[in-house]
Amino acid sequence: MKVRILGCSGGIGGRHLRTTSLIVDHDILIDAGTGVGDLPIADLAQIDHVFITHTHLDHIACLPLLVDTVGDMRNKPLTVHGTAEVIAILRRHVFNWAVWPDFSETPTPEKPFMRFETIKVKEPVVLGARTITALPASHTVPAVGYSIRSATAGLVFSGDTTVCPELWVEVNKIRDLRYLIIECAFSNRERRLAEMSKHLCPSMLAEELTQLERDAEIFITHLKPGQIELTMLEVEDSIGELRPRMLQNNQVFDL
């Protein structure tokens, strides 16, 4: 199993900055930020499942366009997985005919381009040899992280979160955890903003990682454009002994 990073920036501003999305093999997306737009149409048409962490625009920007682009090229609906709260927000505020058509009933209710599948935190979804499990997260809207596991190794993606003890309880249960991708959206000088918006800054991240009991490689995501170098320097100062690295577009993880 391979996980490739399509986007990992906290904003836009050039060819190297794409917002959050990960592709698992060729057929599963974790979030659908602007990085999805770099995929060719043939690749887009092969995506069967999209797992959404939360409904902020940087994580769902390409979802409506994806469904619209490839819906008539597929022989089955695209399945969008999310918690009940996430799906309710998508129905009410995105696929509502005012912002975008409701493709869960278009072109016909019997054969729609998209279907919603409700998931619950800590309940695994098995897709072939891949197991994807929603993990607790704490953000300004209903949110989860995800565990992505093969038969031999696991990767955790925190999504957007602030301090969340429940997350670490679940992460520490994953004995074969190989990679941890965790957000750090703001520099320390904006800690108050990080707290208000329920993100992390390096000093908060250092506090959170004291709860990590697994020997995983750590990658930092969701860095804000304009503060990337500063934030990564502060990350190095705070948790340098854990050898954290900045997540990169097109980085590939083998599981």
Image: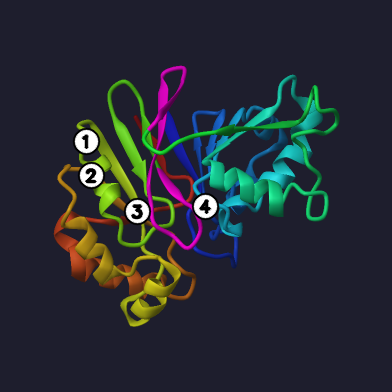
Asked if the residue under mark 1 is in contact with the one under mark 2, i.e. CB atoms within 8 Å, the reply is yes
Residue 23 rendering spot, x and y as whole percentages: 51, 37
Circle 1 — which element? loop
Asked if disc 4 and disc 2 are in contact, CB closer than 8 Å, the reply is: no
Numbered-mark total: 4
Going 81% across and 45% down the picture, which residue do you hit? 101
Query: What amino acid type is highlighted by mark number 2?
Result: Val
Give the magenta-colored segment's residue range.
Answer: 123-145
Chosen colour scheme: rainbow
- Residue farthest along the bottom direction in this orientation: 189
Of tags 1 and 4, which is closer to the observer? 1
| Mark 3 surroundings within 10 Å by alpha-carbon count, few (fewer than 14), some (14 through 19), many (20 or more) | many
Closer to the chain start, of discs 2 and 3, is: 2
Q: Label 2's element? A: helix
Three-letter residue code for mark 1 = Lys
Q: Which mark is residue 169?
A: 2
- Lower sequence index among marks 3 and 1: 1
Horizontal relation, residue 138 to residue 206: left or right: right
Quadrant for the C terminus, please: top left
Q: Are marks 3 and 4 in contact (CB under 8 Å)?
A: no
Instruction: Point out residue 190 in the picture as x, y percentages from the top left corner.
Output: 38, 80
Q: Position of residue 24 (x, y in %)?
A: 48, 33
Distance from disc 1 to disc 4, alpha carbons, whole Å, reads 26 Å
Left or right for 199, reference 84 = left
Could you tell me how far apart the alpha carbons at marks 3 and 1 are, in whole angstroms?
A: 17 Å
Residue situated in front as seen by the camera: 95 or 224 = 95
Instruction: Please rate how many residues cluster around mark 4, counting C-alpha atoms within 10 Å: few if below 14, some from 14 to 19, many from 20.
Output: many
Residue 173, disc: 1
Q: CA distance from mark 2 to mark 3?
A: 15 Å
Residue ID for mark 3: 182
Residue that label 4 marks: 20
